[in-house]
Image (tube, coloured by chain):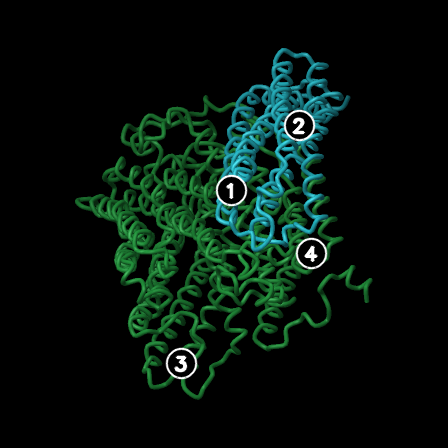
Amino acid sequence: MVFASVLLGKLSWQVFPKDIVTLGAFVSIVAGGILVAALLTYFKKWGYLWREWLTNTDHKKIGVMYVILSILMLIRGGVDALMMRAQQATAVGASHGVLSSSTFQQVFSAHGTIMIFFAAMGLMFGIINLVVPLQIGTRDVAFPFLNLTSFWLFAAGAILINLSLGIGSFSAAGWLAYPPLSELKYSPSVGIDYWIWTLEIAGIGSLMSGINFLTTIIKNRAPGMTLMKMPLFSWSVLCAMFLVIFAFPILTVTISLLFLDRTLGTHFFTAGGGGNMMMYVNLIWAWGHPEVYILILPAFGVFSEIVSTFSRKKLFGYRTMVWALAAITVLSFSVWVHHFFTMGAGADVNGFFGIMTMIIAIPTGVKIFNWLFTMYKGKIHFNSALYWFFGFVILFTIGGVAGVIMAIPAADFQLHNSLFLVAHFHTMIVSGVLFGYFAGFTYWFPKIFGYKLDEKLGIKTFYLWVIGFILAFFPLYILGFLGATRRINHYAANLGWQPLFIVAGIGAVIIAGGVAMGVWQQIVSYRRRQEYKDKTGDPWNGRTIEWSVPSPAPYYNFKAIPVIHDRDAFWVAKQNHQALVSDDDVVDIILPKRAPVSFILGMCALVFGFAMIWHIWWLVIVSLIAFVVILMVRLNDEKPYEVVTAEDILAHEKSLKTGNVV
Amino acid sequence: MDELEVKTISHKKLLNRLYKKEAPKFFETASFGFFVYLMTDLVLFASLFAVYAVLEGNTFGGPSGQQIFNLNNVLIETLALLTSSFTMGLAILSMKKGHRNKVLLYLVISFLLGAVFLTIEMNEFSHLISIGDSWRRSGFLSAFFVLVGTHGLHITVGLIWMAIMFFKVLKSGLSESNARRLTLMSMFWHFLDIVWIFIFTIVYLYGVLGL
């Protein structure tokens, strides 16, 4: 027995799930994995996958991997959402719904964690990876090996959170795991530990990405591109990455302290022993509020590009846009207490944070008006990417106004933890963040894959999402006013809430239809890729330099790095009938080598996290040593680069023109 | 030599030539990126300082800082660490002048001073644990151990890094890549020094004053 507990820690035969929902989910994920592996073996694609994708440091490939993984996680989180809607639509009066209460708690905890950390963050880093180096005129990010490693840490977190379905259980303490509930005394199972190590690993990946992109934007811009000539999407990313490097260390500290409380018996957030549980809530929101701006700022940037391109006008008020971004960046660190006005910090503190919260609505309003003025008197082209903007601008404003209402502490005492709050932040994150990245994905898709997405299906996807969204979340505003709190798994029949919950459930199903339509759009567009082919590299009559390279963007990005003289450099060049670079500018270059080490490091981190969760101490030590040694061996490589000669580049450009490469 | 071999050799020469051209830019980017990393580490320490400030008074019947801090030891620790920062600076100056042996000498001195610091800290910790005042005792002691311990962990990493750099310089001299790594390492070491000044002031000096 002693031997087994040293070897396996807390693992035993008891850890496998007993309820049918969790087991079914885990079995279907495993079966899906086996199916993909079988298909790869049958088509003999393992080598291709390994060389061209899993170990490739090309930022575009990494971006695509981020997007695919995030969409999978979005579906996983979406299934959680459907289960919650099913539960709340049916658990009334004598009926106790479709889920057991412990499963329900795990489902809402997993839904929040997955959607924020893996769906929204993943889509964000995906789009950033795809676009930023192309937009600022560089061949890759500042640290390509680190970039791939960040992706694999992100993937390790994603795998870990899905493992909790089949081995042990997940956190039942909500997506932010407030103590004292999340302390060992009240949550003795491994659920919280899964939560901690998932976020620890994925969070360090995000932090490293933040450092990487900040450095890339500061140091690697094309010659002549001063900061005030930088396209607005890159500006928004710069601001978001600034927030990442200031906010994510706080997350790392906070959950590490929770880990120490649970594992080594410290007293940071315990109810006794001199701990302070409200300190946890302060710390987690000192990260958490900037986090929501980290998610939304790049979406703002995406919309700025799209509105300007499809209105055929330069962006209205570029400078004010930049200053608005900067103001939001700074202010986002001064509003965190509005997440817990009910803590009882007193009128002065609550008053300060309430006012700061209202102030932050001003730069956001500036941005909304600038987008509208950009469209004013423009030649508007109704592309599906712009549809997402229309949905965003209306819904986001409604959600924003709801937010300003809750910024009034007195009102917040009523609305705190009600479904009104849930409706508010879903409006911001779904119609703000998700719509933004869907729009960006539609917009930049041809640049990465070489063909456009099907317009009609794109518009259908949009309508399903918007109608589903309104049906799913507007009833929650009303329910919140009626007094329904979040995370309830049962309510009395005489409250009369059921019809509204049923409408919300129908809305969720329609959103699921929107997800399915989006997948169908991908399939149809792929089958018609010859028809939708982007032959010019500039399918939307674009303004910024990413549209000056052929589609799909070659692995070296630019045959020669252009010199920038103007904010809309490519647009101006087109007006003057000039090319940004010519074949004479092409020279021999070096590009980073593939990095299988990144994948191995990610897997070491996965094993490390798993061993930490289950207290398998020997495996903790082994995986940690493996991680450090492998990293050092890699860092010992003096020149992890390979040569691409001018002839290679010119030959590749020629093949892109004749269309021999798909 | 067959054709393929000729091609590989010329390819390698081309890589060396192109890399040499890019090297100053890589150096600059790496220094900047590493500096940004240090700033994230600073935010990490800032959070731990905030935690310490909140929990400092929560002794929960256990000892307060006034009762357990020994300023004599802390003074020796501080002097050791500050001097090692100075000798690290001398190592970088010698590196810039190309004096390989001096670099090695200063690395050894910095390492030994860092080891002195770490030994005293370990002694302090083990003493506290042995008299029953571990991190389990109270919120204050949890915050103390984790803040000072995190710094100590960083010092340990720094010492390992220094040892590796010693052998690298011994083996391949002051090559371009070694110079880059030495520069980053010295940034890391000075950074830990600055964090220690704050620990020294906020944890130990204020603690002993009992403010």
Question: What chain letter is assigned to the residue under label 3?
Answer: A
Question: What chain letter is assigned to the residue under label 1?
Answer: B
Q: CA distance from mark 1 to mark 2?
A: 38 Å
Q: Which residue is mark 2?
A: A638
Residue A661 appears in view? no
Q: CA distance from mark 4 to mark 2?
A: 33 Å
Q: Position of residue A74 (x, y in %)?
A: 48, 60
Q: Which residue is mark 4?
A: A611
Callout in the foreground (3, 2):
3
Residue A98 appears in view? yes
Sequence order check, earlier mark of 3 and 4: 3
Q: Amino acid at mark 1?
A: Phe
- Say which of A311 and B159 sits in front: B159
The chain painted cyan is B
Label placed on residue A407: none
Q: Which residue is mark 3?
A: A491
- Say which of A507 and A525 sits in front: A507
Residue A458, quarter of the rendered image? bottom left
Q: Residue at x 58, y 52 (%)?
A: A155
Q: CA distance from mark 3 to mark 2?
A: 64 Å
Residue A421, quarter of the rendered image? bottom left
Q: Which residue is mark 1?
A: B49
Q: Colour of chain A?
A: green
